[in-house]
Every structure is written in C-alpha cells, then in structure tokens.
Amino acid sequence: MIPLPQRFSLSDGRFAFAPAMRLTGPPDLTALVRQELGDLGVGWCETSTGEIPALAVGLDPALAREGYVVRISADAVQLSGGSAAGVFYGLQTLRQLLPASALRRAQGFHDWSLPGGEIADEPSLSWRGLMMDAARHFMPKDFLFKLIDLLALHKLNVLQLHLTDDEGWRFDCARYPLLTSVGGWRPETRMHAQPTGDGTPHGGFYTQDDLAEIVAYAARRFVTVVPEIELPAHAAAAIRAYPALGTAEPSTVLNVEDSTLSFVFDVLDEVLAVFPSEFVHVGGDEVPPGPWERDPGALARMRALGLTDAALLRDWFMGEVGRWLSARGRRMVTWGGLDPRFAPPNAAVMSWQSIEAGVEAVRSGRDAVMAPASPTYFDAYQSESDDEPMVMGGLTTVESLVEYAPVPPSLSAAEAERILGTQSEIWTEYLPTPARVEYMVFPRLCAFAEAAWRTTQSRSYADFLPRLRAHLPRLDALGVNYRPLDGPHPWQRGGTGRFRRPR
C-alpha cells in the first residue's frame, strides 16, 4: 500500500464482497462509496432485510479531519472518518487492498475480498501537492482529470496549476482577450540546448468554464486546485499580448506603473471567481533587476518609495498584490520570501531553493510549503543512464524521495507547525505531451506521496521497494505511462533529436 498507513494490524479471515451489498451511512458519504467503488460491479442496497455483507460509513469527531479508521471482519467493513475527506482516504485504502484489476473501469463483479484487520491512519501534513506546469507546454483538460484521479489515489490533496509563463498564457481572461489569442500561442518551440526552434506551432488555453469544471472535479476527490499567475517576471506572454505592460527595453518583466497593477488586479479578480482556494500563487521569483534599473517609470517608483535596490521593488510589487488578495480573504503564496516590510502577515512561502530556505522562512514567522528542487522537482533525470530522455537537468531518484524529510528535525514544535506541507513540481519545457509528463512523474510521485503522508516515521528504500513493485500493476491498470524501475522502455527513450539525452 502507498502511502503506508500510520497504524495497522491484520487478523484472520477475509471480508468477501457480494453482488448485492448493504450500504449504510449519511447520504453524502454513501455517495462517496458509490463514486470510488462503483466499478466493482456491486449492487449497493441502502436497506435490506437479508443476511448480506455490509459496508458502513460514518463520521467520528474524535479523529483528525483527514484521518480514518477501517475495521474489516468477515461480516462487515466499518469505515469512519474525521470528515468526508477522511472517509474518502479510507476508501482509497480499500481500493488498494483489492487486486490491481479492481482499479479498471466497469470490469464487472469478481470475487473481490479484503483482508481482515484494522487500519488507523491520518496524514502528517495538510498540504500534499503537485505543481503542474501547463504554461511551457499546454496540457489538455482530460489529462488533468486523470492526474487528479492519480493524486487522490495516493492521498495527495493539492494540484497547483502553473497557468502563465514566458512561453504561454493559459487562463482565458474576459477583460484581456489578447492574453490567450496572442499570448497563448507561439510559432515554434526552442529547447534550451538547441540553437533553433522546431518549426511547430504550439498553444492552447483553458476557458473559465474548463477551469471551473476542473476545480469541481477535483473537489469531489478532495483535491484543492491552487492557481498560479506568475508575476512580475516570467511575463513575456502577457507582454506580447499587451506591450504597454513591459519595461522601456524589451524584457520578460512587467513594469511597475499603476496601470499595470490595475491589469494584475483585473486578472486576479477573474481568477478568484473561478478558483475558491484559500491560497493563490503569484510567482514572485527570478526577477532580473536590469530592466527596472533602466526603466524611467521603475526608477521614479523607487525614488518615491525611498528604495535603492531593485530587488526591494520586487518585494513592494508583490506586497501590493498580497495585500489586494488579503483584502478579499485570500492568501498569497510566492516562490521564496519577501522583505518583512512589504509582505502581508498571512503570506506564505513556497521554498524551492532548499530545505534551509524553508527553515529560514518559518523561523522568521512565515508559513511555508517545502518544495526543494532537490528532490521534489520531477523535471530532473531519473537515473544517470544515457537512455533517459533529455530534460532540464539534475537527478531525482525514487530512493531520494523515499528518504526526503519535509519537516527538518532541527525545528522546534512551534516552528514545525508553520510547515503547511510539501509539494512536488513538474516543469514542462521538455515535456510536450501527457505521456512524457507521466513518464517523469511516475513512479516518483508514489515515493513523494509516502514522504508527504508519513513525515514522522522512519522510512527505508528496502521497505518501500517491494510495495512499489506491487503497486506498479495498479498504474498499469490505470493506463499510466510510468518509467519502469529498471529503466525506460525503448519507446520512452525519446529517439533522436531534441528529446534525446546528449551522450
């Protein structure tokens, strides 16, 4: 099972499913059972006078919100959760206790059975996420549905959607239609390691109806979709669409005029209407100072604010965005922290540079999500073999993720409380298709899920590997193009050209 439950014990005997079974519990919880176990071919009866097997679901206020307890005997399965989310995670545990074939769609009734015993489980962290970069290469809506299903199976609960970057703008904004009609498309793609482009146009975007559908689909699986609108750098797509947003010289950085802040607030106003999440990610990283240091408007803004450093102008800009979000009941999260003079009190830090940067953030009184590039960036190579397809660089192995500890033991109990959770990231510069994304994400996401769920338990690769081998048939049943543990299939190696790792 992945992630391994916190506490479990096995007993003799098994619970055998029947073609007709009694299902009891509140309607919203029994609906979850039908949603998650509906492909088993079982006829669920909410009332029955016969002696048929039973599955009972309910709430227990003594449990943690996402916690659950499952008791399995020969006669019945009892599942209690601290909330509907806890019941949902208990159902994921039941799905993983069944054979891998039980995850296939509409396969009809088989002799399904569960081992007897008791499982008591709850997550260590409240934010357990994956960032999906749909800006560098657009990813179709149906793939996001599949990804959400896979997150839920592994008890992950956040999908951060990276919707804008230099390469493309994917959020359809009614007030600024050129963001997608111009900024959502490019004539070709040039990889960092290639001197020329591929000559193939690329683009796409999500309508607000698309995104509302994605948000609703995820909510039914207790996954929160956190939008990311990258500011003030990584903004070349927006500037292509509306050149007045740029600086005096061509750059990928927004200017700091009042009109540009109004543009940002207009866009975010539409973002908030689609995404109900508490957190809104607004980037805030990798802002080169040069364009502002040579821009008359930026220099005037710095003088008016009494700033001598363009880096502090970035902090002021992000602070304005954060205060705007706070006034609307939302919380800003950024890649890295801000100067305390400008950061709103409720702003959170997503620490990608290192674990140490996250420690520094929480010790300064900020909430943090641990997302260190090593080992949570999945655009790194999975091995040192030349057979791996070309990606950005670096190395992240399954073993390194099993050993990853998102909450450093050096933190005090009060400091550790400020670690909201942890997140993995998949950047798509070199990943033009869902199949290539799946290859880079799986099975590494399985190991990450274990690290995110069980942060206080010691973990070993020797313990994890047999469970991962047993888990891979589930990925097969779900049609995931994962990387085999002994190396890529021949058709996954990227062939020749831009996706082939240089020898």
Image (cartoon, helix red, strand yellow):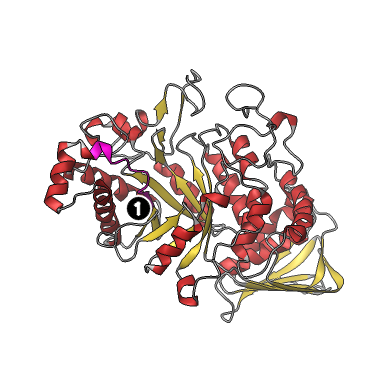
What residue is at 48 percent from the left and 47 percent from the top?
Answer: 213
What residue is at 82 percent from the left and 59 percent from the top?
Answer: 112
Specify whether 242 is left or right of 382. left
For the N terminus, the quadrant is: bottom right
**Is disc 1 surrounded by few (<14), some (14 to 19) or many (20+) residues within 10 Å?**
some
Residue 25 shows up from this direction: no
Q: Position of residue 394 (x, y in %)?
A: 57, 42
Q: Where is residue 345 in the image (x, y as percent from the top left)?
A: 31, 66
Q: Give the range drawn in magenta.
A: 281-292
Task: Count the numbered circles shown.
Answer: 1
Specify whether 292 is left or right of 426. left
Q: Where is residue 328 in the image (x, y as percent from the top left)?
A: 29, 60
The answer to which image quadrant residue 143 occupies is top right
What residue is at 71 percent from the left and 29 percent from the top?
Answer: 491
Pick the residue in front: 37 or 289.
289
Residue 425 shows up from this direction: yes
Q: Is residue 90 magenta?
A: no
Amino acid at circle 1: Leu
The residue furthest bottom is 62
Residue underneath mark 1: 272
Is 276 located above or below residue 177 in the figure? below
For the C terminus, the quadrant is: top right
Specify whether 28 is left or right of 274. right
Q: Position of residue 249 (x, y in %)?
A: 23, 30
Secondary structure of the residue carrying numbered label 1: helix
Specify whether 430 is left or right of 180. right
Q: Does the magenta stretch include residue 287?
A: yes
Pick the residue in front: 298 or 289.
289
Pick the residue in front: 472 or 75.
472
